[in-house]
Image (cartoon, rainbow, N blue to C red):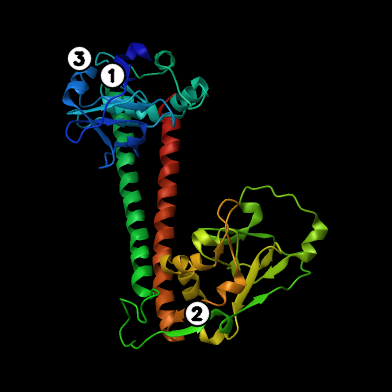
């Protein structure tokens, strides 16, 4: 690879004092999603230190940055070379214009499975994984002789990267919309009405203790049903789909609790992501608490599904969360003492329908992102040898 580059160098190995005004001193953590990302928390060094670092060479717009310490193999094209430099966790790769047409092709090449696999093989595992510049120099790469072909390959990869970035932003915007709606459409501990409300609904939300709303279920002796596990983002899923191989004896399944669609489950990570909701029929470990409504006609399950994962509710859960060092757990009996606020069933359904729509949009955009990521992976395998 070294023969295809006019510059192969890593960032500074020195230690420098931080200053308020000066040049940015960045590292591998600033290479995110194919870009250099600078935040107000990043360090600056003095102009004198910056000049010493770049006494014999200068970074240029178009240099390819490659992370070589910690998380190996992330890359970006330097868009602005003024008053910034990097620590040794980042390598600088500058294409030889007689061999490589552009930084775009070199950047695209760095994303290929062949390039990434070679990096992994040459990575040295110590306190932090790393790869030596001499090993980067020895990487075997195949480059089309025709510069027009290089340009076309680079154009395809850069285009799909742009589409991926746009798709990621769309997905993130929808997630932020949902987060905002959860805060606006549900009341917090200090209010009796939400900040945002559907037309024709008014008045304070009802308030009741959990023990007057819910009851726990412990139906057992269903060993033929699918074993379920709780997840933070997908609710209850078949244990076989989690990729975690948990050993258990078949005869112990008779002691597992039955779960039905619409049930809620208190699990080990409830303090982080709320209670898990089940769309499935199955069984769960007896360590889980399964509960549902005493008067189901008064409540919309999907409304409560969203309520139980909202920021306001998770903050409320902290009152009944125990343990710090060995992992936290939720006391179901203490949860029943909490005051739950909720509107009439018709308003619950309105709110639930809105979140169903948002969740469907999120799932659709997530699926598009997954497909685009798979397409990029396929192209990187086919376009580079």
Q: Position of residue 172 (x, y in %)?
A: 35, 54
Q: Position of residue 125 (x, y in %)?
A: 52, 24
What distance separates the C-alpha of mark 3 from that of mark 1?
A: 21 Å
**Relative height, residue 34 to residue 62 (above, below):** below
Q: Residue furthest right?
A: 251
Can you say which quadrant of the picture contains the N terminus?
top left
Q: Residue furthest top?
A: 3
Q: Position of residue 310 (x, y in %)?
A: 43, 67
Residue 17 found in image quarter: top left
**Foreground: 291 or 150?**
291
Q: Residue at x 43, y 17 (%)?
A: 132
Reading the image, the residue beneath label 3 is 55
**Foreground: 92 or 383?**
92
Reading the image, the residue beneath label 1 is 95
Which label's residue is closer to the chain start, 2 or 3?
A: 3
Secondary structure state at the residue bearing disc 3: loop
Which label's residue is closer to the chain start, 2 or 1?
A: 1
What distance separates the C-alpha of mark 2 from that of mark 1?
A: 61 Å
Secondary structure state at the residue bearing disc 2: loop
Residue 186 found in image quarter: bottom left
On residue 300, which mark appears?
2
Q: Is residue 261 visible?
A: no
Q: Nearer the viewer, mark 2 or mark 1?
A: 2
Total number of numbered labels? 3
Q: Position of residue 344 (x, y in %)?
A: 44, 86
Which label's residue is closer to the chain start, 3 or 1?
A: 3
């Amino acid at each position: 690879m070294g023969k295809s580059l006019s510059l192969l160098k890593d960032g500074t190995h020195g230690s420098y004092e931080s200053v308020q005004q000066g040049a940015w001193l960045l590292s591998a953590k600033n290479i995110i999603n194919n870009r250099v990302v600078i935040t107000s928390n990043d360090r600056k060094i003095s102009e004198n230190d910056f000049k010493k670092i770049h006494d014999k060479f200068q970074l240029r717009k178009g240099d390819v940055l490659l992370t070589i310490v910690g998380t190996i193999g992330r890359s970006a094209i330097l868009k602005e070379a003024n008053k910034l430099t990097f620590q040794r966790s980042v390598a600088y790769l500058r294409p030889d214009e007689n061999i490589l047409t552009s930084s775009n092709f070199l950047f695209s090449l760095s994303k290929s499975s062949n390039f990434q696999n070679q990096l992994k093989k040459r990575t040295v595992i110590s306190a932090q994984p790393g790869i030596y510049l001499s090993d980067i120099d020895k990487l075997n790469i195949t480059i089309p002789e025709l510069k027009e072909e290089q340009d076309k390959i680079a154009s395809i990869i850069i285009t799909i990267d742009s589409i991926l970035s746009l798709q990621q932003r769309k997905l993130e915007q929808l997630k932020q919309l949902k987060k905002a709606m959860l805060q606006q459409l549900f009341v917090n501990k200090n209010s009796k009405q939400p900040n945002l409300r559907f037309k024709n609904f008014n008045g304070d939300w009802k308030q009741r203790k959990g023990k007057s709303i819910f009851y726990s279920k412990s139906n057992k002796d269903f060993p033929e049903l699918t074993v379920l596990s709780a997840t933070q983002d997908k609710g209850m899923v078949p244990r076989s789909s989690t990729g975690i191989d948990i050993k258990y004896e078949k005869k112990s399944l008779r002691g597992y609790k039955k779960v039905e669609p619409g049930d809620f489950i208190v699990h080990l990570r409830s303090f982080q992501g709320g209670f898990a909701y089940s769309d499935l029929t199955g069984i769960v470990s007896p360590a889980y608490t399964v509960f549902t409504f005493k008067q189901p006609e008064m409540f919309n399950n999907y409304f409560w599904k969203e309520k139980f994962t909202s920021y306001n509710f998770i903050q409320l859960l902290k009152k009944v969360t125990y343990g710090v060092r060995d992992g936290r757990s939720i006391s179901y009996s203490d949860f029943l003492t909490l005051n739950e606020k909720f509107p009439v069933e018709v308003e619950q359904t309105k709110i639930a329908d809105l979140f169903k729509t948002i969740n469907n949009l999120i799932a659709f955009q997530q699926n598009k992102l997954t497909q685009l990521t798979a397409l990029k992976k396929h192209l990187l395998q086919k376009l580079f040898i």
